[in-house]
Image (cartoon, rainbow, N blue to C red):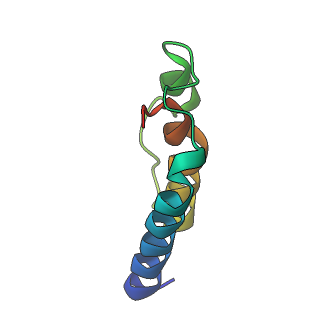
Amino acid sequence: MTFQEDGQATLDWVVGYLERLRELPVMARVEPGEIRRALPASPPDEPEPFAAVLRDLEEILLPGLTH
C-alpha cells in the first residue's frame, strides 16, 4: 500500500471508531498484563504492513482503553 492508502485506512478507522464509540464499553475489558502478553517481546525484524498495525490497534489495544 502507499502512504496515501495507509493514511486513508487510518482515517477510515478513526471515523469507524467515532461512529461506534457509544457502543463501546466505558471501562477496559482486560486483566492487568493482558495487553503486554498479547504483544511481541520485541519489535519485528522486518516492516509490517500498516494493516497489521491497525489490526493490532483494534484487537489488542482497543479492548484495554477506557472510553
**Residue drawn 57% across the image and 21% down it:** 30
Q: Where 18 sits versus 58, above or below?
A: below
Front residue of this view, candidates 47 and 61: 61
Q: Where 56 sits versus 35, above or below?
A: below
> How far across and down, in percent of the image, does residue 13 sit?
50, 66
**Residue drawn 42% across the image and 73% down it:** 11
**Residue drawn 44% across the image and 34% down it:** 65
In the image, taking residue 35 as reference, residue 7 lies left or right, namely left
In the image, taking residue 43 as reference, residue 49 lies left or right, namely right
In the image, taking residue 67 as reference, residue 35 lies left or right, namely right
Front residue of this view, candidates 42 and 24: 24
> Please, which residue is most extreme toward the top here?
32
Front residue of this view, candidates 6 and 67: 67
Quadrant of the image for the C terminus? top left
> How far across and down, in percent of the image, does residue 14 sit?
44, 64
> How far across and down, in percent of the image, does residue 46 sit?
47, 57
Q: Where 57 sits versus 41, above or below?
A: below
> Please, which residue is most extreme toward the front here?
22
Q: Where 3 sits versus 17, above or below?
A: below
> How far across and down, in percent of the image, does residue 25 sit?
56, 34
**Residue drawn 58% across the image and 24% down it:** 29
Q: How many marks?
A: 0
